[in-house]
Image: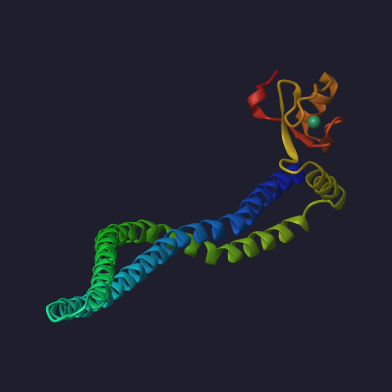
Amino acid sequence: MQRDLELLLDLQEIDDELGELERSKIYLPEMIQKLESEISTLEKEIEGNKSTLQDSLKEQKALELDIETDKQQLENFQRQMKIIKTNKEYDALTAEIDSKKLEIAEKEERVLSLMSTIDECQEKEKELSSSLDGVRSGNKEQLKLLNEQSSSLQAKIDDRMEKRSRLIKNIKRQVFGIYERVRKGKGGLVVVPVRKRACGGCFKQIPPQRIQEIRRGDRIFSCDSCGRILIWSDENGTE
Ligand SMILES: [Zn+2]
């Protein structure tokens, strides 16, 4: 095979690797972000649950003190009941007692609802912290690996870029020009093998005469249709 073709295949390999590395530059931070946000979402949920629990406990305590005071007032009213003298006083005190009882009942109902919220929060706290443990340990290894890959990425890109520029110096300017033009125009592979008497890139049939020339590999041939550089592949046998 012609030296230029060999160099082009090497160049193509480096460019494929560079493409892969450039994709990783986008993909790796996304993956890391996703794994980290799985953890932080759970942490936030735990925080939210904890503050609901604390608020509920605080409100419950305050209500229970209130109810104590209300009950003492109720007892006072009931004592006064025994010493009232007029119907008017009786009616007023009855109204006070009824309203105090209602107040106590409403507060007790709220306490019951708070107690069930507190139970739910405590249950949820156990579930969430065990989920967090699971996610943390599950993501830890993966995050370590991804962070390592991410931090060595630029060095790998620099390494390939350096190899690339060294390689390019050895390729004929005109041949490299063809390669760069096709690569920018078509993306992906530039040097493609002949397959079943056709271009391996666009599948256009190649005239027999041209196939013989490509096989000899005396010079660089481009596909008439897509412009990709054609090489002979041993897969074609010796036909
Ligand atoms: Zn083609």
Quarter of the image where the N terminus is located: top right
Quarter of the image where the C terminus is located: top right
Q: Position of residue 38 (x, y in %)?
A: 44, 58
Q: Total label count?
A: 0
Q: Nearer the viewer, residue 4 or 152?
A: 152
Horizontal relation, residue 217 to residue 43: left or right: right
- At x 21%, y 78%, the residue is 86
Horizontal relation, residue 80 to residue 132: left or right: left
Q: Position of residue 2 (x, y in %)?
A: 76, 41
Q: Nearer the viewer, residue 211 or 55?
A: 55
- At x 53%, y 67%, the residue is 151
Q: Reply above or below: 163 against 219.
A: below
Q: Which picture quadrant has residue 124?
A: bottom left
Q: Position of residue 35 (x, y in %)?
A: 46, 58
Q: Position of residue 7 (x, y in %)?
A: 72, 48
Horizontal relation, residue 2 to residue 21: left or right: right
Horizontal relation, residue 109 to residue 209: left or right: left
Q: Nearer the viewer, residue 87 or 165?
A: 87
Indicate which quadrant contains ligand 1: top right
Q: Which picture quadrant has residue 51?
A: bottom left
Q: Nearer the viewer, residue 102 or 127?
A: 102
Q: Which picture quadrant has residue 121?
A: bottom left
